[in-house]
Image: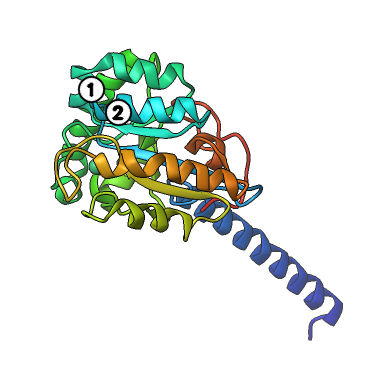
Amino acid sequence: MGNPRIKLHRGGIALFGMAVLVALLSSCSAAASAAHLSRGCREGRRVALTFDDGPNPTQTEQILDILQSHHARATFFDEGQAVEAHPEIVQRELALGMAVGSHSYAHGKDLPTLTRADFAIDLQQAEAALTPVLGYKPALYRAPYGHTSQNMLDELHAEGYVSIGWDVDSTDWSGATVDAVVSSVLDNVHPGAIVLMHDGGLGGGNPDRVTTIAALPRIIDGLHERGYALVTVPEITGAPAVHGHERRRECSAS
Ligand SMILES: [Zn+2]
């Protein structure tokens, strides 16, 4: 017969071991989930507008003019091939304090179907376009159409990228009216929101992004009236824009 106090002691050690294991597992899953973020920290009334598919010589410049005149910042997910064509627009994005991330090289529809090695080729091609213009290797990535695969997420994580989704869709890609786009943002905004918008691209129901450009001043004014500060994705999530930089702080981003 064993000593019940020893049994209790052993039980305690076992419980302690379980607790350590659970803590390790949960910290691992937290690290894994940090590879993809679709919202920012809930602290404070802050929102991050994001613009995909640029840079575009007319549309992006108009959007930058609006952001600049409203003292607002945003995040641009740029396509590698458009960056090669218009590096000066990316430099203006940076000069105005915008954050810039990768949105693939050519907006391929098939990226989620690729092997990890083939996706890596597209990722590197986009990176080769962006890095000399930014002056650093980017660390933010938004998948075209928001469609990711495990291969994509694994490669992004290995290459030091954080995949950035959104949790408020402006619907500016859908052919919606200006009023509907404004309402889609203002009716759904919340602290920590990441908002999907578009500054480039020629597809969808808003090909020249006139809806986006008309809605943007009303969206910014509406957010300011509601007490929101417009910040970048790195600011709202803590995820770095620059490869190799640490995530700035832990928060309830997810
Ligand atoms: Zn896109």
**Residue at 74% in and 66% down:** 13
Foreground residue among 240 and 217: 217
Q: Mark 1 points at which residue?
A: 57
Tell me which corner region of the image, top left, top right, bottom left or bottom right, holds residue 157.
Answer: top left
Residue 160 visible? The answer is no
| Place of residue 79 in the rendered image (x, y in percent of width and height, measured from the top left) | 24, 31
At a point 14% along the width and 39% down the height, the residue shown is 202
Q: Does residue 95 lie above or below 60 as drawn?
A: above
Residue at which label 2 appears: 60
How many numbered marks, from 0 up? 2
- Is disc 2 placed on a helix, strand or loop? helix
Graded by Cα atoms within 10 Å as few (under 14), some (14 to 19) or many (20 or more), the crowding at tag 1 reads some
23 or 96: nearer the viewer: 96
**Residue 101 image offset from top left, x and y in percent:** 36, 31
> Is residue 66 visible from the viewing direction of this image?
yes
Left or right relative to 187: residue 108:
left
Given contact means CB atoms under 8 Å apart, are the residues at marks 2 and 1 in contact? yes
Q: Label 2 is placed on what type of residue?
A: Thr
Residue 118 in percent (x, y) is at: 16, 38
At 45% from the left and 46% from the top, the residue drawn is 219
Residue nearest the viewer, comparing 101 with 48:
48
